[in-house]
Amino acid sequence: MEANTSNIYLFKALEAYPYELAKAMEALNYALSYDPENVRALCLMAKIQDEQLGEFELARSYYEKALALRLDLPAIYPDFIRLLVNNEEFEAAQRLIEFARTVKGIDSAVIELAQAKLFEATARYDEALDALKEAKQLAMNGDFIMYVDEVIGRVKKKREFANNKKRKLRETQPEPVKESTGVKWFSGRLNNLL
């Protein structure tokens, strides 16, 4: 009976989120009080802690608890990966992406998009573009493909900007200044006086 009650409150929280946060939090607290191991309630609580309250560590602990309870639930991975990337936990995000690829029923296109965002966050733009092309190939949704096209455009602009910046730095390298012997004698003389 407690699992059913927990799910009823979970449905109320899902219905209220993100427009009525107070109702969503109240329902989630009830859901977790009836069943502290309700994985979907833990994931929604993590999402609220991250997106609405900016509590990275608390959100991470909720996601980790959810994963400890059920590694096979595909819904956990995209949001948890995004949390790790946004908080510059790049190695942990990469490990999670690699594991998520092995989960049965995972949306591979979404995981490839997460991989691309990780590459983009670490300024590895060519690898990000490769991952985005793979995401488009795996996609089963036209809106998703249009979104990926927008991300590809953004990454290409970032890559172009980074390449231009590197080129300008190389072009503006100052040539070594040759010291004349007269100035060197005079500065050496001043240093001896001081």
Image (spheres, helix red, strand yellow):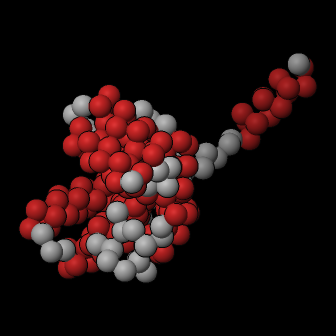
Left or right, 44 with reference to 57: left
Task: Please provide percent x and percent y for residue 121.
Answer: 42, 55
Q: Nearer the viewer, residue 1 or 156?
A: 1
Q: Quadrant of residue 68?
A: bottom right
Picture quadrant where residue 141 is located: bottom left
Q: Position of residue 156 (x, y in %)?
A: 25, 61
Picture quarter with the N terminus? bottom left
Extreme residue toward the front, this view? 1
Taking the image as drawn, is residue 95 in sight?
Answer: yes
| Residue 171 vertical position relative to residue 29 in the rendered view, above or below | below
- Left or right: where does residue 46 sit relative to residue 113? right
Rendered position, 64 above or below 101:
above
Question: Where's residue 60, x and y in %?
Answer: 52, 49
In the displayed orientation, state which residue is furthest to the top: 194
Q: Residue at x 53, y 42 (%)?
A: 58
Comparing 194 with 127, the one in front is 127
Query: Can you say whether 28 is above or below 119 in the image?
Result: above
Looking at the picture, does residue 70 appear above or below residue 23? below
The quarter of the image holding the C terminus is top right
Q: Residue at x 61, y 45 (%)?
A: 177
State the residue in front, 109 or 175.
109
At x 35%, y 48%, the residue is 5
Q: Is residue 165 visible?
A: no
Q: Count up the numbered dots.
A: 0
Query: Residue 114 at what x, y percent from top left?
Result: 36, 63
Task: Look at 90% across and 25% down and name the residue there.
Answer: 192
